[in-house]
Image (cartoon, rainbow, N blue to C red):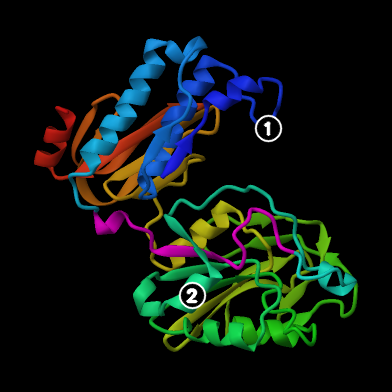
Amino acid sequence: VGEDDTRTFRSQPYNPRWGNPTAFGTLAGFRRNIAQRLTTGGAHWFLDIYGHWFDAPSIQRTIRRGHDIMAILGGYAPLRCLGAEAAHVRKVDTNLHKRINTQEDLRQVHYPKKILKSPHFTVDPLLWRNLREHSSAELGYRVYLFDDLYALDESDLRVLENYKRDGNVLVFTHATGYSDMRTLSAENVSRAVGIRVEDDKPGQEFSNMTWTWTQGGAPLPQRGLPAAKRFNVTDGDVTVLGRFADGRIAAAMKKHGDWTAVYLPAGYPQGEVLDRIGALCGLHVYTDLPVNVGAGGRCVSVYCPVAEAKGTVRLPGRFSAVELHSGTCLFGVEEIPVDMSYGETRLYFIGDEDEVRTVARL
Protein backbone atom coordinates (compact mmCIF):
# COMPACT_ATOMS: atom_id res chain seq x y z
CA VAL A 1 0.00 0.00 0.00
CA GLY A 2 1.47 3.33 -1.05
CA GLU A 3 1.05 6.57 0.88
CA ASP A 4 0.53 9.74 -1.16
CA ASP A 5 1.68 12.64 0.99
CA THR A 6 1.78 15.20 -1.79
CA ARG A 7 0.28 17.59 0.79
CA THR A 8 3.68 17.56 2.49
CA PHE A 9 5.15 19.31 -0.55
CA ARG A 10 3.16 22.42 0.32
CA SER A 11 4.76 22.62 3.76
CA GLN A 12 8.24 22.88 2.24
CA PRO A 13 7.73 24.98 -0.90
CA TYR A 14 11.34 26.17 -1.01
CA ASN A 15 12.95 22.79 -0.57
CA PRO A 16 13.91 21.46 -4.04
CA ARG A 17 13.77 17.92 -2.73
CA TRP A 18 10.02 18.28 -2.23
CA GLY A 19 9.21 21.24 -4.43
CA ASN A 20 5.82 20.73 -5.99
CA PRO A 21 4.15 23.97 -4.86
CA THR A 22 1.65 24.40 -7.69
CA ALA A 23 -1.89 23.20 -8.30
CA PHE A 24 -0.85 21.78 -11.70
CA GLY A 25 2.06 19.87 -10.17
CA THR A 26 -0.15 18.51 -7.40
CA LEU A 27 -2.79 17.25 -9.82
CA ALA A 28 -0.21 15.76 -12.17
CA GLY A 29 1.55 14.12 -9.22
CA PHE A 30 -1.64 12.51 -7.94
CA ARG A 31 -2.43 10.97 -11.32
CA ARG A 32 1.12 9.75 -11.84
CA ASN A 33 1.28 8.22 -8.35
CA ILE A 34 -2.08 6.45 -8.67
CA ALA A 35 -1.01 4.95 -12.01
CA GLN A 36 2.34 3.81 -10.64
CA ARG A 37 0.74 2.07 -7.66
CA LEU A 38 -1.98 0.31 -9.64
CA THR A 39 0.36 -1.03 -12.34
CA THR A 40 2.67 -2.52 -9.71
CA GLY A 41 -0.08 -4.37 -7.88
CA GLY A 42 -0.41 -1.98 -4.98
CA ALA A 43 -3.15 0.07 -3.38
CA HIS A 44 -3.06 3.80 -2.71
CA TRP A 45 -4.10 6.07 0.12
CA PHE A 46 -3.92 9.81 0.69
CA LEU A 47 -2.58 11.70 3.69
CA ASP A 48 -3.53 15.14 4.93
CA ILE A 49 -5.48 16.22 1.83
CA TYR A 50 -7.28 19.44 2.72
CA GLY A 51 -6.86 23.21 2.68
CA HIS A 52 -5.41 25.69 0.19
CA TRP A 53 -5.70 24.41 -3.41
CA PHE A 54 -6.21 20.86 -2.17
CA ASP A 55 -9.87 21.85 -1.72
CA ALA A 56 -10.12 22.61 -5.46
CA PRO A 57 -12.82 20.50 -7.17
CA SER A 58 -10.37 19.13 -9.77
CA ILE A 59 -8.04 17.80 -7.09
CA GLN A 60 -10.82 16.39 -4.94
CA ARG A 61 -12.32 14.68 -8.01
CA THR A 62 -8.96 13.11 -8.79
CA ILE A 63 -8.64 11.79 -5.25
CA ARG A 64 -12.15 10.33 -5.31
CA ARG A 65 -11.54 8.86 -8.75
CA GLY A 66 -8.41 7.15 -7.46
CA HIS A 67 -10.44 5.39 -4.78
CA ASP A 68 -13.15 4.49 -7.34
CA ILE A 69 -10.55 2.99 -9.69
CA MET A 70 -9.15 0.79 -6.91
CA ALA A 71 -12.65 -0.46 -6.13
CA ILE A 72 -13.29 -1.22 -9.82
CA LEU A 73 -10.03 -3.12 -10.33
CA GLY A 74 -10.66 -5.28 -7.28
CA GLY A 75 -13.32 -7.14 -9.25
CA TYR A 76 -11.09 -8.24 -12.14
CA ALA A 77 -8.42 -10.93 -12.28
CA PRO A 78 -5.04 -9.74 -13.60
CA LEU A 79 -3.97 -10.38 -17.17
CA ARG A 80 -0.89 -12.57 -17.19
CA CYS A 81 0.47 -10.94 -20.34
CA LEU A 82 0.74 -7.60 -18.49
CA GLY A 83 2.90 -9.11 -15.75
CA ALA A 84 6.65 -8.58 -15.57
CA GLU A 85 8.88 -11.03 -17.44
CA ALA A 86 12.05 -9.47 -16.03
CA ALA A 87 13.38 -8.82 -12.53
CA HIS A 88 15.93 -6.30 -11.27
CA VAL A 89 17.97 -7.94 -8.51
CA ARG A 90 19.91 -5.99 -5.87
CA LYS A 91 21.73 -7.18 -2.81
CA VAL A 92 20.61 -4.28 -0.64
CA ASP A 93 17.27 -2.51 -0.50
CA THR A 94 18.50 1.01 -1.12
CA ASN A 95 18.77 3.55 -3.92
CA LEU A 96 22.45 4.03 -3.17
CA HIS A 97 25.26 1.60 -3.87
CA LYS A 98 26.52 -0.25 -0.83
CA ARG A 99 30.27 0.02 -0.43
CA ILE A 100 31.66 -3.39 0.51
CA ASN A 101 34.62 -1.78 2.30
CA THR A 102 37.04 1.11 1.90
CA GLN A 103 39.86 -0.69 0.09
CA GLU A 104 41.13 1.60 -2.64
CA ASP A 105 41.37 -1.21 -5.18
CA LEU A 106 37.77 -2.26 -4.56
CA ARG A 107 36.47 1.28 -4.43
CA GLN A 108 37.34 1.63 -8.12
CA VAL A 109 34.44 -0.54 -9.20
CA HIS A 110 31.73 1.55 -7.57
CA TYR A 111 29.59 3.68 -9.83
CA PRO A 112 27.50 6.39 -8.16
CA LYS A 113 23.80 5.64 -8.40
CA LYS A 114 22.16 7.66 -11.14
CA ILE A 115 18.50 7.88 -12.07
CA LEU A 116 18.52 6.92 -15.73
CA LYS A 117 15.75 6.16 -18.16
CA SER A 118 13.90 2.96 -17.38
CA PRO A 119 13.36 0.22 -19.95
CA HIS A 120 10.06 0.05 -21.80
CA PHE A 121 9.31 -3.48 -20.63
CA THR A 122 7.96 -4.31 -17.19
CA VAL A 123 10.46 -5.15 -14.45
CA ASP A 124 9.79 -6.37 -10.92
CA PRO A 125 12.21 -5.46 -8.10
CA LEU A 126 13.83 -8.39 -6.29
CA LEU A 127 16.31 -8.63 -3.46
CA TRP A 128 19.11 -11.17 -3.37
CA ARG A 129 17.41 -12.96 -0.50
CA ASN A 130 14.41 -13.60 -2.78
CA LEU A 131 16.70 -15.66 -5.01
CA ARG A 132 17.93 -17.62 -2.00
CA GLU A 133 14.40 -18.34 -0.79
CA HIS A 134 12.89 -19.41 -4.13
CA SER A 135 13.81 -21.49 -7.14
CA SER A 136 14.02 -20.28 -10.72
CA ALA A 137 10.82 -22.15 -11.55
CA GLU A 138 8.97 -20.59 -8.60
CA LEU A 139 9.88 -17.03 -9.56
CA GLY A 140 9.26 -17.65 -13.24
CA TYR A 141 11.02 -14.63 -14.77
CA ARG A 142 12.74 -14.92 -18.13
CA VAL A 143 15.34 -12.18 -17.64
CA TYR A 144 17.24 -11.23 -14.48
CA LEU A 145 19.06 -7.88 -14.36
CA PHE A 146 21.76 -7.91 -11.68
CA ASP A 147 23.58 -5.02 -10.04
CA ASP A 148 25.28 -4.36 -6.71
CA LEU A 149 27.12 -7.69 -7.04
CA TYR A 150 30.75 -6.57 -6.75
CA ALA A 151 31.46 -9.08 -3.98
CA LEU A 152 30.20 -12.70 -4.20
CA ASP A 153 31.30 -15.48 -1.88
CA GLU A 154 30.90 -19.20 -2.54
CA SER A 155 27.36 -19.31 -1.17
CA ASP A 156 26.39 -16.40 -3.44
CA LEU A 157 27.86 -18.17 -6.46
CA ARG A 158 25.80 -21.27 -5.64
CA VAL A 159 22.68 -19.10 -5.66
CA LEU A 160 23.63 -17.81 -9.12
CA GLU A 161 24.18 -21.36 -10.38
CA ASN A 162 20.59 -22.20 -9.44
CA TYR A 163 19.41 -19.56 -11.92
CA LYS A 164 21.67 -20.61 -14.78
CA ARG A 165 18.92 -22.84 -16.16
CA ASP A 166 15.29 -22.91 -17.36
CA GLY A 167 16.11 -20.80 -20.42
CA ASN A 168 16.87 -17.77 -18.22
CA VAL A 169 18.80 -14.75 -19.46
CA LEU A 170 21.11 -13.33 -16.77
CA VAL A 171 22.30 -9.78 -17.41
CA PHE A 172 25.42 -8.86 -15.44
CA THR A 173 26.95 -5.41 -15.12
CA HIS A 174 30.49 -4.10 -14.87
CA ALA A 175 32.41 -5.76 -12.01
CA THR A 176 30.07 -8.57 -10.99
CA GLY A 177 31.91 -10.90 -8.62
CA TYR A 178 35.20 -8.92 -8.76
CA SER A 179 35.74 -9.81 -5.10
CA ASP A 180 35.36 -13.38 -3.84
CA MET A 181 36.03 -12.12 -0.29
CA ARG A 182 39.68 -13.23 -0.64
CA THR A 183 40.95 -11.94 -3.96
CA LEU A 184 40.15 -9.25 -6.52
CA SER A 185 40.48 -10.38 -10.11
CA ALA A 186 38.98 -10.55 -13.59
CA GLU A 187 38.92 -14.34 -13.19
CA ASN A 188 36.32 -13.90 -10.47
CA VAL A 189 34.21 -11.79 -12.85
CA SER A 190 34.54 -14.40 -15.61
CA ARG A 191 33.44 -17.20 -13.27
CA ALA A 192 30.38 -15.35 -12.02
CA VAL A 193 29.26 -13.98 -15.38
CA GLY A 194 29.97 -16.97 -17.62
CA ILE A 195 31.82 -14.81 -20.16
CA ARG A 196 35.61 -14.57 -20.12
CA VAL A 197 36.93 -11.05 -19.43
CA GLU A 198 40.33 -9.56 -18.63
CA ASP A 199 41.42 -6.54 -16.64
CA ASP A 200 42.21 -3.71 -19.03
CA LYS A 201 44.79 -2.24 -16.64
CA PRO A 202 45.65 -4.51 -13.70
CA GLY A 203 46.08 -2.79 -10.38
CA GLN A 204 44.55 0.52 -9.43
CA GLU A 205 44.46 1.97 -12.93
CA PHE A 206 41.39 3.50 -14.54
CA SER A 207 40.46 3.13 -18.21
CA ASN A 208 38.27 5.02 -20.66
CA MET A 209 34.73 3.60 -20.19
CA THR A 210 33.13 5.20 -23.24
CA TRP A 211 31.48 2.49 -25.32
CA THR A 212 28.85 2.05 -28.04
CA TRP A 213 26.05 -0.50 -28.39
CA THR A 214 26.39 -1.91 -31.91
CA GLN A 215 23.98 -4.87 -32.08
CA GLY A 216 20.78 -4.14 -34.03
CA GLY A 217 19.43 -0.69 -34.85
CA ALA A 218 21.40 2.52 -34.84
CA PRO A 219 24.56 2.62 -32.68
CA LEU A 220 23.92 3.85 -29.12
CA PRO A 221 26.89 5.72 -27.60
CA GLN A 222 27.15 5.07 -23.85
CA ARG A 223 29.40 7.27 -21.76
CA GLY A 224 28.77 6.52 -18.09
CA LEU A 225 31.77 7.54 -16.02
CA PRO A 226 34.69 8.81 -18.12
CA ALA A 227 37.09 6.46 -16.29
CA ALA A 228 36.81 3.44 -13.99
CA LYS A 229 38.09 -0.11 -13.55
CA ARG A 230 37.44 -1.75 -16.92
CA PHE A 231 37.08 -5.34 -18.07
CA ASN A 232 37.41 -6.27 -21.75
CA VAL A 233 35.56 -9.30 -23.13
CA THR A 234 38.09 -11.81 -24.51
CA ASP A 235 35.75 -14.80 -24.92
CA GLY A 236 35.74 -15.95 -28.55
CA ASP A 237 32.35 -17.67 -28.42
CA VAL A 238 30.11 -14.63 -27.95
CA THR A 239 27.78 -12.32 -29.84
CA VAL A 240 29.32 -8.86 -29.66
CA LEU A 241 26.83 -6.27 -28.39
CA GLY A 242 29.12 -3.25 -28.06
CA ARG A 243 32.68 -1.98 -28.20
CA PHE A 244 34.81 0.49 -26.30
CA ALA A 245 36.18 3.55 -28.08
CA ASP A 246 39.46 1.70 -28.68
CA GLY A 247 37.69 -1.20 -30.42
CA ARG A 248 37.91 -3.75 -27.61
CA ILE A 249 34.74 -5.75 -26.89
CA ALA A 250 32.73 -4.02 -24.14
CA ALA A 251 29.41 -5.92 -24.11
CA ALA A 252 28.57 -9.44 -25.19
CA MET A 253 26.02 -12.27 -25.09
CA LYS A 254 26.85 -15.98 -24.76
CA LYS A 255 24.53 -18.98 -24.88
CA HIS A 256 25.21 -21.79 -22.40
CA GLY A 257 22.83 -24.57 -23.35
CA ASP A 258 19.82 -23.89 -21.10
CA TRP A 259 20.69 -20.29 -20.18
CA THR A 260 22.18 -17.14 -21.67
CA ALA A 261 24.71 -14.72 -20.18
CA VAL A 262 24.87 -11.02 -21.03
CA TYR A 263 27.72 -8.80 -19.87
CA LEU A 264 27.54 -5.00 -19.91
CA PRO A 265 30.40 -2.70 -18.90
CA ALA A 266 28.12 -0.10 -17.34
CA GLY A 267 27.00 -0.23 -13.74
CA TYR A 268 23.59 1.18 -14.69
CA PRO A 269 22.75 0.77 -18.39
CA GLN A 270 20.46 3.28 -20.00
CA GLY A 271 16.89 2.36 -20.85
CA GLU A 272 17.64 2.26 -24.60
CA VAL A 273 20.25 -0.45 -24.05
CA LEU A 274 17.91 -2.47 -21.86
CA ASP A 275 15.21 -2.15 -24.53
CA ARG A 276 17.63 -3.64 -27.08
CA ILE A 277 18.40 -6.50 -24.71
CA GLY A 278 14.70 -7.02 -24.06
CA ALA A 279 14.04 -7.25 -27.79
CA LEU A 280 16.88 -9.77 -28.22
CA CYS A 281 15.37 -11.88 -25.42
CA GLY A 282 11.84 -11.75 -26.81
CA LEU A 283 10.38 -9.48 -24.11
CA HIS A 284 7.47 -7.23 -24.97
CA VAL A 285 8.86 -3.70 -25.38
CA TYR A 286 5.93 -1.30 -25.19
CA THR A 287 7.33 1.74 -27.01
CA ASP A 288 10.42 3.64 -28.07
CA LEU A 289 8.95 7.00 -27.06
CA PRO A 290 10.62 9.03 -24.26
CA VAL A 291 7.78 8.21 -21.84
CA ASN A 292 7.51 6.02 -18.73
CA VAL A 293 5.29 2.98 -19.24
CA GLY A 294 3.91 0.82 -16.44
CA ALA A 295 1.94 -2.40 -16.85
CA GLY A 296 0.45 -4.90 -14.46
CA GLY A 297 -2.81 -6.35 -13.20
CA ARG A 298 -5.40 -4.90 -15.59
CA CYS A 299 -3.70 -1.56 -16.27
CA VAL A 300 -1.23 0.09 -18.60
CA SER A 301 -0.05 3.58 -17.68
CA VAL A 302 1.86 6.18 -19.68
CA TYR A 303 3.57 9.19 -18.04
CA CYS A 304 5.16 11.98 -20.07
CA PRO A 305 8.34 13.43 -18.47
CA VAL A 306 9.27 15.49 -21.56
CA ALA A 307 7.75 18.53 -23.28
CA GLU A 308 5.85 16.47 -25.86
CA ALA A 309 5.50 12.83 -26.92
CA LYS A 310 3.64 11.57 -29.99
CA GLY A 311 3.45 8.00 -31.25
CA THR A 312 2.06 4.73 -29.97
CA VAL A 313 2.33 2.25 -27.09
CA ARG A 314 2.18 -1.37 -28.24
CA LEU A 315 -0.01 -3.80 -26.29
CA PRO A 316 1.01 -7.48 -25.85
CA GLY A 317 -1.95 -8.59 -28.00
CA ARG A 318 -5.28 -7.31 -29.32
CA PHE A 319 -7.42 -5.82 -26.56
CA SER A 320 -9.97 -3.17 -25.80
CA ALA A 321 -9.09 -0.35 -23.38
CA VAL A 322 -10.62 2.58 -21.52
CA GLU A 323 -8.69 5.55 -20.14
CA LEU A 324 -9.84 5.62 -16.53
CA HIS A 325 -9.80 9.40 -16.00
CA SER A 326 -11.34 10.59 -19.28
CA GLY A 327 -13.51 7.58 -20.17
CA THR A 328 -12.11 7.42 -23.72
CA CYS A 329 -12.54 3.88 -25.13
CA LEU A 330 -10.56 1.92 -27.71
CA PHE A 331 -11.89 -1.35 -29.07
CA GLY A 332 -9.93 -4.23 -30.60
CA VAL A 333 -6.58 -2.47 -30.81
CA GLU A 334 -2.94 -3.57 -30.61
CA GLU A 335 -1.63 -0.03 -30.07
CA ILE A 336 -2.62 2.92 -27.93
CA PRO A 337 -2.10 6.34 -29.56
CA VAL A 338 0.02 8.79 -27.56
CA ASP A 339 -0.18 12.58 -27.88
CA MET A 340 0.91 13.94 -24.51
CA SER A 341 2.54 16.96 -22.90
CA TYR A 342 4.82 17.30 -19.89
CA GLY A 343 3.37 15.95 -16.63
CA GLU A 344 0.40 14.15 -18.17
CA THR A 345 -0.53 10.59 -17.21
CA ARG A 346 -2.84 8.16 -19.00
CA LEU A 347 -4.14 5.12 -17.11
CA TYR A 348 -5.85 2.43 -19.19
CA PHE A 349 -7.95 -0.53 -18.07
CA ILE A 350 -7.27 -3.46 -20.45
CA GLY A 351 -9.77 -6.21 -21.22
CA ASP A 352 -12.29 -7.52 -23.73
CA GLU A 353 -14.98 -5.29 -25.24
CA ASP A 354 -17.70 -6.20 -22.73
CA GLU A 355 -15.42 -5.58 -19.76
CA VAL A 356 -14.31 -2.22 -21.12
CA ARG A 357 -17.89 -1.09 -21.79
CA THR A 358 -18.82 -2.08 -18.23
CA VAL A 359 -15.85 -0.27 -16.65
CA ALA A 360 -16.45 2.81 -18.81
CA ARG A 361 -19.91 3.19 -17.26
CA LEU A 362 -18.59 3.10 -13.67
Which residue lies under the disc numbered 1? 17
Q: Which residues are magenta?
A: 79-98
Residue drawn 33% across the image and 47% down it: 314
Question: Is residue 199 rendered to the left or right of residue 129?
Answer: right
Quarter that holds the C terminus: top left
Q: Foreground: 54 or 180? A: 54
How far across and down, in percent of the image, does residue 122 sit? Answer: 42, 55
In the image, residue 145 sits, relative to residue 343, either above or below, namely below
Q: Secondary structure at mark 2?
A: helix
On the rendered image, what quadrant is the N terminus found in? top left
Q: CA distance from mark 2 to mark 1?
A: 34 Å
Q: Are marks 2 and 1 in contact (CB under 8 Å)?
A: no
What percent of the width, then of the height, locates residue 288?
A: 46, 46
Residue plotted at (59% across, 25% down): 9
**What secondary structure is the magenta-colored segment mainly?**
loop
Q: Residues within 10 Å of mark 1 (few under 14, many from 20)?
A: few
In this figure, which residue is indicated by the disc labeled 2? 131
Residue 205: quadrant of the picture: bottom right
Q: Dot 1: what SS?
A: loop
In the rendered image, residue 96 lying in the magenta stretch gets the answer: yes
Examine the structure image and report whether residue 271 is included in the region drawn in magenta. no
Q: Residue furthest front?
A: 48
Name the residue nearer the viewer: 75 or 83: 75
Mark 2: amino acid: Leu
Residue 96 location (% of width, % of height): 69, 55
Q: Which mark is residue 270?
A: none
